[in-house]
Image (cartoon, rainbow, N blue to C red):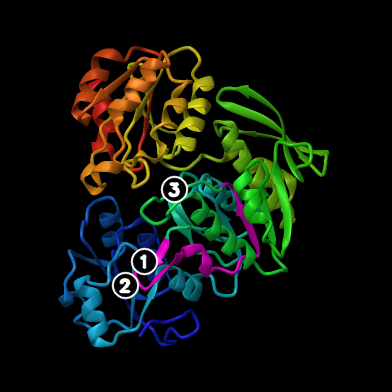
Amino acid sequence: MQMDKNSIPKDVKTIHMIAICGTGMGALALMLKDLGFSVTGSDLKVYPPMSDFLSGRGIDIAEGFSAEHLSYGPDLVIVGNAVSKDNPEVVHMQRMGLHFCSMPQAINTFVAAGKKQILITGTHGKTTTASIVAWILDCAGVDDTFFIGGILANFSSNYRLGQGEYIVIEGDEYDTAYFDKGPKFMHYDPHVTILTSVEFDHADIFRDKDHVITIFTDLVSGLNDSSTLLSFDGDRNVERVVAAANCRVVGYGRTEESGWRLGKIDLQPPWSSFEVFKGGRLYRRFETMLVGEHNLLNALAAIAVADLLKIPIAATQKALATFKGVRRRQEVRGIKNNIVVMDDFAHHPTAVRETVRAVKPFYPEGRLIAVFEPRTNTSMRDIFQDVYPDCFDAADLICIRKPPLLKKIPEGQRFSSQKLVDDLKQRGKDAHYFESTDLIVDFLKITAISGDVILIMSNGGFDNIHERLLESL
């Protein structure tokens, strides 16, 4: 039977996780192991580093999905959101009458119970903002728990089990499970919520922008009236969503009316120094190695949370100054012959534009080479075909790969990388189209020169292009 958070058996000792190797499921598996549960799991593609990380902690992982993996009769099965109802393990789980739940239900029951939840949501910036909040709490000596969708460089982990009263959760708008098509973030009851942005994304789940707005409105309208919502006030879609709130709402942004305002920014690479105003008055000046105004706005939201939780300002300043970032967010993977190879998760046009714009001022002496692979369900569709050309203006040289998984998209809806390159050339940009990753590596091997920064943007592994470039340059 399907369980809610109050009806999961109290005597659970053994847990099996279907699709265990995802970032979130893997982190949850480790948390459950640390809590003393016996954990097993299975996945269709079991590969390093997650497989090694899990097995190294004593978690048995089976390759592929099979009814045999449930033969020992676990007390509880946690079903990943990518798992369909006709999965062999799901079918056998139902046949055996095993208790099962989703990942958010398990988090609520085993990890977040009794803690004050700090929920970070929005189309962009969730991972970075949540990571900054978690690091601020740590610098303040607060033994917080966190569950985040990226690896925090300061912790070399995307989770931690703390004994303190707070838990920081990255709130995903993606669907929960095959038996619960609502967003994951609807399962939480936050003490504080951050809403960074609302844009159309996840075209495989949402119909259009209005559908996305409806989902976030459902979240905001359901927030407890005793909670606080911190919302970015420079986004019209966020304004529509926030109108449904019944709780306290505090805006942050760059306008004079912002409750928390980002003031003057001074760039002295690798540092960004910025003013923060609270209620129209100077609150304090902060320094960070975060790159780009969008990241400073993420930091601003985290600073507002810290103030709300009565964290000393000195601790917040220390945290911003020592924050090492998140892997795959403007992460320098290596430098070869004075050529920087940088990795970033950007794929939505807004993220691509802001990332390209942010990186350029920090490397003013050389060229910025932007390499983009459209591979998400949204970016491989033609939804943003006419938007992407505007996103590369700050780049000096642009390499666009053909989407690697186009067969997943109906023919009449497919994104054209060749058209994007043609449109970029019409804007006077030095842009190039490539059928494969191999061709990009070969091109950059002879094109990149000392002082260049190669910014690689993809939400996937991109055929290990980062390491291959570092070897070939």
Which of the two residues, 85 or 444, is positioned nearer the viewer here? 85
Q: In this view of the protein, can residue 169 be seen by the observer?
A: no
Q: Which residue is mark 1?
A: 29
Q: Earlier in the sequence, mark 1 or mark 3?
A: 1
- Alpha carbons under labels 2 and 1: distance apart: 7 Å
Mark drawn on residue 39: 2
Amino acid carrying label 3: it is Asp
Task: Return the x and y of residue 197 as percentages of the image width and height.
Answer: 57, 46
Name the residue at 49% across, 70% down.
Answer: 111
Q: Is residue 373 above or below residue 278?
A: above
Q: Tell me the SS state at disc 2.
A: strand
Mark drawn on residue 412: none
Task: Return the x and y of residue 198 as percentages of the image width and height.
Answer: 55, 48
The reply to whether discs 1 and 3 touch (Cβ–Cβ < 8 Å) is no
The reply to whether discs 2 and 1 touch (Cβ–Cβ < 8 Å) is yes
Q: Quadrant of the C terminus?
A: top left
Indicate whether residue 97 is drawn in magenta: no
Examine the image and state in which quarter residue 168 appears. Answer: bottom right
Task: Return the x and y of residue 122 as percentages of the image width and height.
Answer: 54, 51
